[in-house]
Image: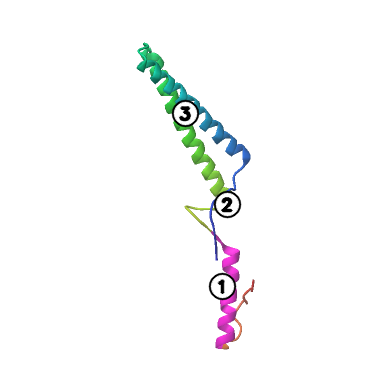
Amino acid sequence: MTIIRVEGTGHEHDECVLELAEHQFTELLIELGEMKDRVREGDAVPDSEVKKCVSAVQRAIDHVFSERKRLDEARRKRAGIVHDYAIDFDAARDEIGRRLDRLRAVGGAGEVPGGADRG
């Protein structure tokens, strides 16, 4: 039986959107760091500017996480994954057929009703 796990099954567009969101987040963190440096140097930074920047960082964080979640869900859906794994039913069916053939050969029980496919 084969278990299919999510790997690199995403679309380039989804990856690009996530990359842009992460880039936006990084830029906002740099801006926030620069603002922090200004405060340390004794510059007066208006509360409204600080609140605006912190709010923008929070929105960027939310955007990155939502894009990451959307991308992961799209990957899982394309791979046929429910929860954390997917079962390859064709491989499972073939394996069951092979095992039934072995049992039949050893036990001499005759044919199994409906037959079994060998992979």
Specify few, some or many for label 1: CA neighbours under 10 Å numbering under 14, 14-19, or 20 or more.
some
Spatial distance from mark 1 to mark 2, Cα to Cα?
23 Å
Of the pair 9 and 99, the residue shown nearer to us = 9
Spatial distance from mark 2 to mark 3, Cα to Cα?
28 Å
Spatial distance from mark 1 to mark 3, Cα to Cα?
50 Å
Q: Amino acid at mark 1?
A: Ile
Which callout, 1 or 3, points to the residue nearer the camera? 3
Specify few, some or many for label 2: CA neighbours under 10 Å numbering under 14, 14-19, or 20 or more.
some
Q: Which mark is residue 60?
A: 3
Q: Earlier in the sequence, mark 2 or mark 3?
A: 3
Give, as a single range, the part of the protein colored magenta: 87-107
The colouring scheme, among rainbow, by chain, secondary structure or one colour, is: rainbow
**Rendered residue at 52%/44% (across/down):** 72
Mark 2 touching mark 3, by CB under 8 A?
A: no
Which callout, 2 or 3, points to the residue nearer the camera? 3
Magenta span main SS:
helix
Question: Looking at the image, is 106 positioned above or below residue 22?
Answer: below
Disc 1: which residue: 96
Q: What is the x, y in percent for residue 21?
A: 52, 31
Badge 1 element: helix
**Rendered residue at 58%/81% (across/down):** 102
Badge 3 element: helix
Q: Which mark is residue 50?
A: none
- Please say whether residue 101 is one of the residues in the magenta stretch: yes
Q: Amino acid at mark 2?
A: Ala
Of the pair 72 and 49, the residue shown nearer to us = 49
Q: Earlier in the sequence, mark 1 or mark 3?
A: 3
Residue 36, quarter of picture: top left
Q: What is the x, y in percent for residue 63?
A: 48, 32
Q: Amino acid at mark 3?
A: Ala
Disc 2: which residue: 79
Q: What is the x, y in percent for residue 1?
A: 55, 66
